[in-house]
Image (spheres, helix red, strand yellow):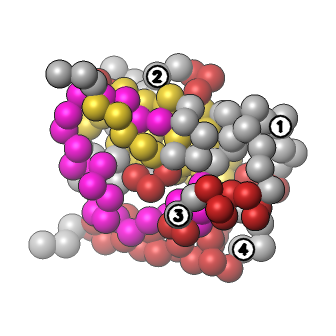
Amino acid sequence: MMTRRTAWMGLAAAAAGLRGLLAANPAQAAQPAPAREVVHSEAEWRKLLAPAQFDVLRKAGTERPFSSPLDKEKRAGRYSCAGCGQLLFSSRAKFDSGTGWPSFYQPVAKDAVEEHTDRTFGIKRTEVLCHRCGGHLGHVFNDGPPPTGLRYCMNGVALSFAPDAA
């Protein structure tokens, strides 16, 4: 059964995916690019990343909701940037938002990610980037659970998961 929230999330995903296909530059390119610890040319990124990862991380695309196995990942572990390996989130902060994307209420450290205003398609959102390589991860919203009230809604293809040792 489709609810208003899932319908809106699907529409938002489609719009964000179109942005990645139609935009000449990702949303973060509109702002001055800070110095990065990990820097590659576009050709190098294309060699290092799978096509879906490149679209999301380097072109600010969005994967289809409910398409990532990380959305349903329940094991204890760590989530890192699929582009550079920067540790971003812990499974302790993960929750099921019902949106179809892996969601967290906080990053492992405030400086692990950067947040920028994204006004694509006239919608004001807060884009989340990897601090180390500048890769687009997703967006953060103010409708998450306690203790932060935030929902870091991340693209699964932008993350890699490492389970904790048993």
Image height check: is 38 above or below 82? Answer: above
Residue 51 falls in image quadrant:
bottom right
User: Which of the labelled discs sits on residue 34, or is there none?
Assistant: 1
Cα–Cα gap, marks 3 and 4? 20 Å
Q: Give me the C-alpha separation between circle 1 and circle 2.
A: 21 Å
The disc labelled 3 sits on which kind of residue? Ala
**Mark 4 and 1 residues: CB-CB less than 8 Å, in contact?**
no
Circle 1 crowding by C-alpha within 10 Å: few under 14, some 14–19, many from 20: few
- Res 79 quadrant in image: top left
- In the image, is residue 128 above or below residue 112? below
- Depth order, front residue of 161/71: 161
In the image, residue 62 above or below residue 72: below
Q: Residue at x 64, y 48 (%)?
A: 135
- Precedes in sequence: disc 3 or disc 4: 4
SS assignment at label 2: loop
Left or right relative to 141: residue 70: left
Residue position marked by numbered label 2 in the rendering: 108
Circle 1/circle 2 CB separation < 8 Å: no
**Residue position marked by numbered label 4 in the rendering:** 23
Mark nearest the camera among 3 and 2 is 3
**Residue identified by numbered label 3:** 50
- Which mark is on residue 129? none
Label 4: few (<14), some (14–19) or many (≥20) C-alpha neighbours in 10 Å: some
Q: Residue 53: give x, y in percent of width and height.
A: 53, 60
Relative height, residue 120 to residue 1 (above, below): above
